[in-house]
Image: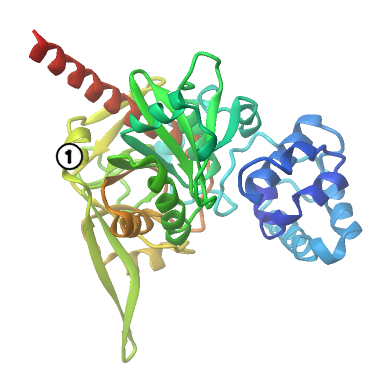
Amino acid sequence: MAAVMKIFHSSAPHYSLIGAGLNVNTADLIDMQGTANIKLHLVFQRWFDADRDVNWDALIKLCDNFPDQLGKAKSNLLEYIGLAESHGTGTKQESEEIDSKEPVDSAAAGEDKTISDDQKSDPPPDVSKYCPKLEDIEQKIKKKKFKDLTVEEKEFISKVRYILVTATPIEYRAVMGSIDPPGSDGNYIRVVTTDKVANFILGKYESCNVAITMTGQGPDKTERVLVSVQNDAKAKYVIAIGMCYGTKESKEKELDDKTNLGDIIVAKSIVDTAHQCIEGKDTIVLTNTYPCGKKLFNLFKHHEVFEFQGKTVKVHHQGSLASEFTLFRSKEAKEEKLKYVQGALGGEMEAKGIYKAAERVGGFEWIVIKAIVDWGTGEKDNTWQPFGAVSCARFVLQCLNDQQGKLIMVRMMNYV
């Protein structure tokens, strides 16, 4: 799935045509909310599930049937197959079946050569049952425009204190697998914002009302979507949940500033590393640091470790996250950039958009909490993505529930 999505990424707007070529039903996707990439993922998921001619030959034939629309995808496909042959991944036969069980959202193909031997021998737990498929989630969602909400639904939104921001489908799936529907009918509500720029899902975690949105990757998309959602939800807090890359791989576990795959970073601040200054032959990174909200940071800073499905990971809350819409292709390129951010424990792509949204609409405090799933270069796989996304979501929501319980206890004591 990761390889196929990477190959056809630029052809996502043609998801319906791709579905027709693969004999996949797409009629229900036309009116479905979500990006073209999400719909394309559903098309391929249905193709994999049907298990009919799931092989490279079928995809090459698909591209040949629609050369004008899928010409670039065919080039990507042939390049990938050639790359796979040269690395001995077993795809020398173009008709060999494709393994659909690999997690989604891979940024690059290939073995993660940056993972140490002890981490390879300690793989993440299987959390697939906590990360539902997009198709299963969609079956439980009712879509409504903001103006068409009932009095009860608007009352629910008025009590939403937290907006949970995800960027990728796997992060969204992890959060949705952690929350319950707002009502007793078992359905979630997708609210189309008043300006129709975005949408958000109403959900509940124990006694805590939340709104969930998926922005897509990058700061600009994040800013645009969050501003639209916040204009309607008017939440007090915004929490970015998901995955990041790590900057300091642990060789000695007793070193506090070192990190392992799966570790959770509660960012004390975000450092924007996108701006540069060229002086002669030297390129200097001009950093801007944005502190995360103090109340939110205090809420999440009291956990040193978090355990989920028998796996214990460290929770780091003494460092920052670098934020830049860039994929580093080598360890050297990453280290050259991050030498200007000595306190960074990891990096990601959306946090600057959250900061800019807060500047525009104000009224909310924000924080970024993400799990390390790779070391931020092109030489990586996505083995840790499902566990990282799920454990991060569970950690955040557990802390929110603990806080909600404390608030209820305080109110009861005041009442007595």
Amino acid bearing label 1: Lys
In the rendered image, the vertical position of residue 152 relative to residue 337, given as above or below: above
- Drawn side of residue 46 relative to residue 390, left or right: right
Residue beneath the point at 49% across and 49% down? 215
| Residue projecting furthest to the bottom | 280
Name the residue beneath numbered marker 1.
Answer: 295
Give the image quarter of residue 279. bottom left
Residue beneath the point at 55% across and 22% down? 129
Q: How many marks are shown on the rendered structure?
A: 1
The residue nearer to you, when weighing 132 against 28, is 28
Instruction: Residue 201: give x, y in percent of width and height.
Output: 49, 34
Q: Residues within 10 Å of mark 1 (few under 14, many from 20)?
A: few
Instruction: Residue 310: give x, y in percent of width and height.
Output: 38, 20
Rendered-image quadrant of the N terminus: top right
Residue beneath the point at 38% across and 31% down? 210
Rendered-image quadrant of the C terminus: top left
- Drawn side of residue 57 relative to residue 273, left or right: right
In the rendered image, the vertical position of residue 105 relative to residue 386, given as above or below: below
In the rendered image, the vertical position of residue 345 relative to residue 133, given as above or below: below
The residue nearer to you, when weighing 155 against 220, is 155
Instruction: Residue 128: give x, y in percent of width and height.
Output: 55, 26
Q: Is residue 347 visible?
A: yes
The residue nearer to you, when weighing 346 against 151, is 151
- Drawn side of residue 416 relative to residue 332, left or right: left
Describe the element under mark 1 as helix, strand or loop: helix
